Image (cartoon, rainbow, N blue to C red):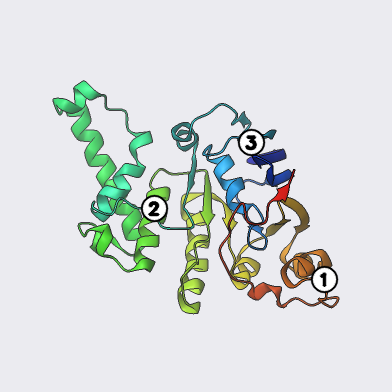
Amino acid sequence: MSLLAIEGLTVKFGGLVAVNDLSLAVEQGAIHGLIGPNGAGKSTVFNCISRFYKPSAGTMHFDGRNLAGLEPHQIIGLGIARTFQNVELFRRLTVLDNLLIGLHSRTGGGVVSGAFLLPGVRREERQARARAMEVLDFLGIGHLANQSAAGLPYGQQKLVELGRALVSQPKLLLLDEPAAGMNNQETAELGGLIRQIRQSFGATVLLVEHDMSLVMSLCEQITVVNFGRKIAEGRPREIQQNQAVIEAYLGEEAGPGEAHFRDAQGEDRPERGAQRA
């Protein structure tokens, strides 16, 4: 059974169809890519899984459980964590405090016990801090724990956001354009880091990314969407040679077998390429 199973997912914004009858299965332990041109609906899919958007139609099951009706904080509790296209940090807080927020769904101290700092709460706080520091050290930024998140370079801010997702020990990690703004060396290091995350944390990864060199070298399975509809699915070499994918990236004049669509760059804007209903 797939860890994540999406069937017939459709998302409409008024008269616009951002995702159109999409089905997708992510296997346990996989690094699965979700790619497509700008406006293809990729981030909209992530927002549906995270329950920020409510689908117009279709079903989503995670680890055998129907996600319909759940709230975003319940999704985190199930074992799904994510990063965003644009870094979303609590900029006035320290790096460590940003990760501790990511552990909120895993801590059980109530208002009364927290107010009186009962022994169980103090023990839980120590464990949470230790867990957060383990993740920061894993990412190579433990020395930044007490620095303000606002003062960090962009690349380090992205690592903090990744750490906040990892600290909750997710079964499924949704990475939304993690290589955006990175140079070639940083992107290559990111690929190695994602592999280490799967090995060390046991996390399944669903990756949205425009850097095709990263996608093709990292993912075992790739799903391609265009105008919200799935146009191809398969292993990297199959996707590179798929004419529908090449045309989606380069236009209808692309010649057969042309595969330099892998250099496609840009940001995903969910509604820009949406179809009229």
- Which amino acid type corresponds to the residue marked 1 in the rendered image? Glu
Residue 54 image offset from top left, x and y in percent: 59, 35
For the C terminus, which image quadrant?
A: top right
Residue 106 locus on image (x, y percent): 37, 35
Question: Where on the picture, by quarter, is residue 238?
Answer: bottom right
Report the residue that reaches farthest toward the left: 116
Callout 2: SS: loop
Residue 3 tag number: none
Q: Is residue 247 visible?
A: yes
Question: Is residue 2 among the parts visible in the rendering?
Answer: no
Residue 117 percent location from the top left of the image: 15, 29
Classify residue 111 by image quadrant: top left
Residue neighbourhood size for the residue with mark 1, other residues' Cα within 10 Å, grouped as few (<14), some (14–19), many (≥20): few
Task: Identify the residue under disc 1.
Answer: 252
Q: Viewer-nearest of labels 1 and 2?
A: 1
Q: Is residue 85 above or below residue 253?
A: above
User: Is 274 placed above or below 65 here?
Assistant: below
Q: CA distance from mark 3 to mark 1?
A: 31 Å
**Amino acid at the residue labelled 3:** Pro
Residue lying farthest to the top in this orientation: 112
Which residue shows up at 34% across the image and 65% down it?
140
Tell which of 128 and 6 is nearer to you.
6
Secondary structure found at label 3: loop
- CA gap, disc 3 and disc 2: 23 Å
Between 48 and 95, the residue placed more toward the observer is: 48
Name the N-terminal-most of marks 1 and 2: 2
Q: Pointer 3: what residue?
A: 55
Mark-to-mark CA distance, 1 and 2:
37 Å
Q: Is residue 168 left or right of residue 149?
A: right
* Side of 56 relative to 171 (left or right): right
